[in-house]
Amino acid sequence: MALQQELQVQPKREVEKKRERTVPSAAFLPATDIFETDHALTVIMEMPGVGKENVDVSVENDVVTVEGRIDFSKYEGLQPVYTEYNVGNYMRSFQVSSKIEQSGISAEITDGVMTLVLPKAEKAKPRKIAVG
Amino acid sequence: MPTSFNNPFEALLAFQRALEARMASDWMDATTTGLGSFPPINIFQKGDDFVAVIELPGVDKKDLNIEAKENTIRISGRKTIAYDEAASVHRRERVFGVFDRTLSVPIQIDPDVVKAEYRDGVLALFIPRAERDKPRAIEIR
């Protein structure tokens, strides 16, 4: 049973710096699933600690960029005594090949998992060609 | 090691450094199931009490069980992911399955007063030190 498998820890991967940033902190790559159907591209990202008010999604030149910020104030007054993972903002972008219908993009975040549905533009949907 | 959180930009970096510096700590070595177990746990001190912060993105609250007994806290549950079978897959990085981890804290606790909060995929366990375990000031006559 695939469901019974024991979960393993996935070490967080840090974002490689492609551009310089002025915010002095490490950002992490959210674990991501991407699915494509005839109608839409679905991107699911795990960003624990990120609420719906702290996530930015933008699509520009076929690049989907997601930024999630953690509410760092919750950690105020806490002193780390034992740690197994690091905490930081999340950042990831993808180049998408299909033309995306910008107005139809929907995003929701539940339990730290964001589901982003990017509907394909009419012209990008595959056409069934009937053989005459 | 007091951490200052005055500058919001420096604060996160300082915090990340503090977490990083604690990575090699053997403080809990004998008392948890050890590194590599799921879910990863961070433990913080807040005055006399402890706060354990555990990342469990995508776990439904009702699939999460927390039991406290004596000075151990057991965190178990399952994480499920529903896949759309008709879709073609570009990336599949998320993992799912069952987990079970027991944490022993090196202080005496009252299992009844351990509080758990699950929000945005992060579980926070507030572990107050038992009254009987609190240090007493000894008066010198």
Image: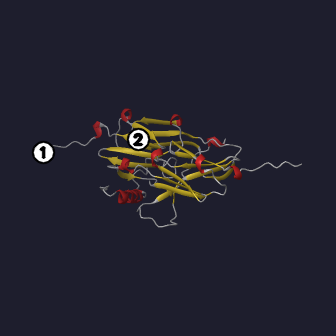
| Label number found at residue B125 | 2
x then y, percent, for residue B65: 49, 36
Q: Is residue A49 left or right of residue A115?
A: left
x then y, percent, for residue A104: 60, 46
Q: Is residue B46 above or below residue A60?
A: above
Element at label 1: loop
Q: Are marks 1 and 2 in contact (CB under 8 Å)?
A: no
The nearer-to-camera label among 1 and 2 is 2
Q: Is residue B59 left or right of residue B138?
A: right
Q: Are marks 1 and 2 on the same chain?
A: yes
x then y, percent, for residue A52: 48, 45
x then y, percent, for residue B84: 67, 43
> Which of the pair A7/A94 is nearer the observer?
A94
Q: Residue at x 47, y 39 (%)?
A: B74
Q: Is residue B83 above or below residue A16?
A: above
Element at label 2: strand
Q: Is residue B134 left or right of residue A69?
A: left
Q: Residue at x 77, y 49 (%)?
A: A127
Which quarter of the image is occupied by the N terminus of chain A?
top right
Q: Amino acid at mark 1?
A: Ile
Q: Is residue A45 at all visible to an observer of this figure?
A: yes
> Which of the two discs, 1 and 2, labels the residue nearer the N terminus?
2
Q: Amino acid at mark 2?
A: Leu
| Label number found at residue B140 | 1
